[in-house]
Image: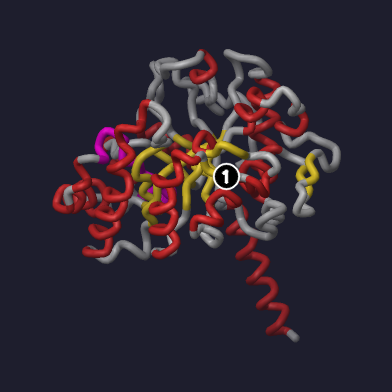
């Protein structure tokens, strides 16, 4: 009996540890007056943020991360994808940005971000999968493929149907691009990365309601025809992604939510109150063990977007207001990481 109790205690401790490790924050640098890279790493550690996503191999950031044990998702920018279609160049990229930093805790390499055959990023479509393959080959050559997972960051814009969630499907023009990627991930036991924003789902659907998008709905809002019930838009969108990849060979490919956030200004319902509510409720949701209706019990590793407001970001005004901290390192919201 004592042994059983000890094993149960160890299991519970493991679950708590895994639970605590489920939330990270994306660190973008398109802003003025941001702290130094070393100060940013200190800010992560002081707030118990154990995961970071960066969008390019910033050498000052990698230097600052040495010895921190913060798990890192490092990105290959879209404009570098073509160069990594050459195996020697991919080998060099891995040497310069991974092997040269043995004291950095790399977890994922995101090869490209939101490449889409239907928009201005279509010029990168043919480069994504070969770059992923070459980066994985480079990791294997130096024995790091079991430690670091290769993927690409997709987003809901690749789907032409998200409702009901069980009918989630990729756009017809996207399937030829995404299916070989999904099969590559499945064959190599790698996750899919997906940027998921209920905020944009709320804006795009005149019938959606704000509490549903903010995790504040009381009870079920959406009854899926397959008997699944949804009380928040985040899990509905995530399950639509799972449904979309399933018939393309990705039924068992785990999805890591590589971005999710809510702006505090610049558009409809973009307020400090709503953004703070969203981030706090998202953290509470993904730190739980309930999973989603389609994938019950599965952990939902999620990266909040983003660490700071970034006033140099292009596009709509709202894009500049996703930070959970201000550039002066003061928290915009009371969040418990």
Look at the picture and state if 109 lies above or below 268.
Answer: below
Relative to 141, 123 lies left or right:
right
Residue at 85% over, 42% down: 219
Residue at 33% over, 39% down: 125
Residue at 27% over, 53% down: 135
Residue 35's x, y, as percent?
Answer: 40, 25
Which residue of the protein is positioned furthest toward the right in this rendering?
218
Residue 83's x, y, as percent?
Answer: 19, 41
Determine if residue 44 is in view: yes
In the picture, which quadrant includes the N terminus?
bottom right
Query: Of helix, strand and loop, which one carries label 1?
Result: strand
Q: Is residue 69 magenta?
A: yes
Residue 167's x, y, as percent?
Answer: 65, 46
In the picture, which quadrant includes the C terminus?
top right
Determine if residue 24 is in view: no
Residue 164 found in image quarter: top right
Which residue of the protein is positioned furthest toward the front in this rendering?
172
Magenta segment: 67-81
Q: Which residue is mark 1?
A: 169
Residue 290's x, y, as percent?
Answer: 71, 55
Residue at 39% over, 36% down: 115
Relative to 45, 7 lies left or right:
right
Nearest the viewer among 267 and 243 is 243
Residue 211 found in image quarter: top right
């Amino acid at each position: 009996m004592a042994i059983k109790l000890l094993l149960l205690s160890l299991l519970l401790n493991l679950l708590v540890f895994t639970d605590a490790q489920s939330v990270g924050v994306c660190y973008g640098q398109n802003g003025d007056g941001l702290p130094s890279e070393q100060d940013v790493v200190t800010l992560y550690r002081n707030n118990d943020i154990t995961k970071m996503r960066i969008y390019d191999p910033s050498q000052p950031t990698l230097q600052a991360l040495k010895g921190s044990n913060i798990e890192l998702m490092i990105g290959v920018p879209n404009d570098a994808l073509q160069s990594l279609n050459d195996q020697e160049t991919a080998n060099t990229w891995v040497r310069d940005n991974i092997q040269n930093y043995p004291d950095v805790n790399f977890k994922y390499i995101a090869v490209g971000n939101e490449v889409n055959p239907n928009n201005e990023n279509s010029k990168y479509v043919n480069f994504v999968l070969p770059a992923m393959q070459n980066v994985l080959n480079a990791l294997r050559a130096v024995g790091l493929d079991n430690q670091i997972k290769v993927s690409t960051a997709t987003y809901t814009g690749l789907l032409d149907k998200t409702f009901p969630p069980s009918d989630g499907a990729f756009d017809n023009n996207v399937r030829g691009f995404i299916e070989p990627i999904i099969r590559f991930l499945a064959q190599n036991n790698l996750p899919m990365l997906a940027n998921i924003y209920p905020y944009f789902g709320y804006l795009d659907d005149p019938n959606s309601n704000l509490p549903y998008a903010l995790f504040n709905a009381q009870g079920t809002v959406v009854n899926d025809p397959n008997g699944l019930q949804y009380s928040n838009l985040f899990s509905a969108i995530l399950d639509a992604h799972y449904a979309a990849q399933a018939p393309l060979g990705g039924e068992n490919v785990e999805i890591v939510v590589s971005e999710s956030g809510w702006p505090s200004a610049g558009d409809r319902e973009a307020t400090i109150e709503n953004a703070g509510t969203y981030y706090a409720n998202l953290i509470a949701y993904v730190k739980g063990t309930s999973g989603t209706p389609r994938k019950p019990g599965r952990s939902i590793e999620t990266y909040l977007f983003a660490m700071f407001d970034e006033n140099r970001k292009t596009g709509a005004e709202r894009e500049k207001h996703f930070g959970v901290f201000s550039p002066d390192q003061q928290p915009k919201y009371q969040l418990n990481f």
